[in-house]
Image (cartoon, rainbow, N blue to C red):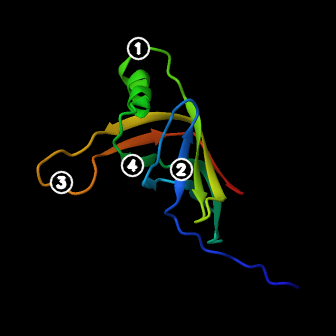
Amino acid sequence: MAEKRVESFLPSFFTIEIEGIECGKFFKCEGLEAETYIYEVEEGGLNTNTHKFFGRTRYANILLENGMTDNNDLWNWYSDTVLKEDKIERKNGSIIMYDSANNELKRWNFYRALPCRWIGPKLGMKMDGCAVEKLEIAHEGIEVQNA
């Protein structure tokens, strides 16, 4: 039987797609997580067995960081969704990882997302690097796809 080759990927080349939003380049993404609750049921009587069952799955919020630009699409999505009394607009999106030749390696699709926190840049005289904005997104599910 042939041995399957497993490669490790460098996590530094990725982009974000959110339907209807021009996202630009992000340099940090956290929260690609899913956790399933496990509950235990003990048998009665003299038997000391414990059975484990799975319950609901919870998805962590996704936290994105990028350098500030003159594009306000992420702020507008947050503002329109959370700060106005308009209809809430949930969006689907993807986080896409590329290799050094810009070939797609892996994709994390998230569903029915809405922004729940926006963080503007830290400003000051002794700041190093670029101004950074952060957006936290709550969603209702994630799936992983290989290219």
Tag nearer the camera, 3 or 1: 3
Q: Nearer the viewer, mark 4 or mark 1?
A: 4
On the image, the x and y values in percent for residue 97 come to 58, 57
Q: Are marks 2 and 1 in contact (CB under 8 Å)?
A: no
Farthest left residue? 125
Q: Nearer the viewer, residue 38 or 28?
A: 28
> Is the Cβ of the residue at disc 4 closer than 8 Å to that at disc 1?
no
Q: Earlier in the sequence, mark 4 or mark 1?
A: 4
Report which residue position mark 3 lands on: 127
Residue 43 appearing in the image = no
Give the quadrant of the C terminus: bottom right
Q: Earlier in the sequence, mark 4 or mark 3?
A: 4
Q: At 56% from the left edge and 32% from the top edge, which residue is drawn? A: 91
Mark 3: few, some, or many residues within 10 Å (few <14, many ≥20)? few
Residue designated by label 2: 15
Give how far apart the Cα atoms at labels 2 and 1 are: 31 Å
Residue at image location 44% in from the left, 30% down from the top? 73
Residue 14 place in picture, x, y as percent: 53, 55
Q: Is residue 17 visible?
A: yes
* 3D distance between C-alphas at marks 2 and 4: 11 Å
Locate residue 84: give its quadrant: top left
> Is the residue 40 above or below the residue 86 in the image?
below
Measured in 3D between alpha carbons, the distance from the residue under mark 4 to the one under mark 1, in whole angstroms, is 27 Å
Characterize the local packing of mark 1: few (<14), some (14-19) or many (20 or more) Cα atoms within 10 angstroms.
Answer: few
Residue 87 appears left or right of 108: left
Name which of mark 2 and mark 1 comes first in the sequence: 2
Q: Is residue 90 placed above or below 122 in the rendered structure?
A: above
Q: What is the three-letter code of the residue carrying label 3?
A: Met
Residue topped by disc 4: 65
Label disc, if present, on residue 34 of the rendered structure:
none
Callout 2: helix, strand or loop?
strand
Residue marked by disc 1: 85
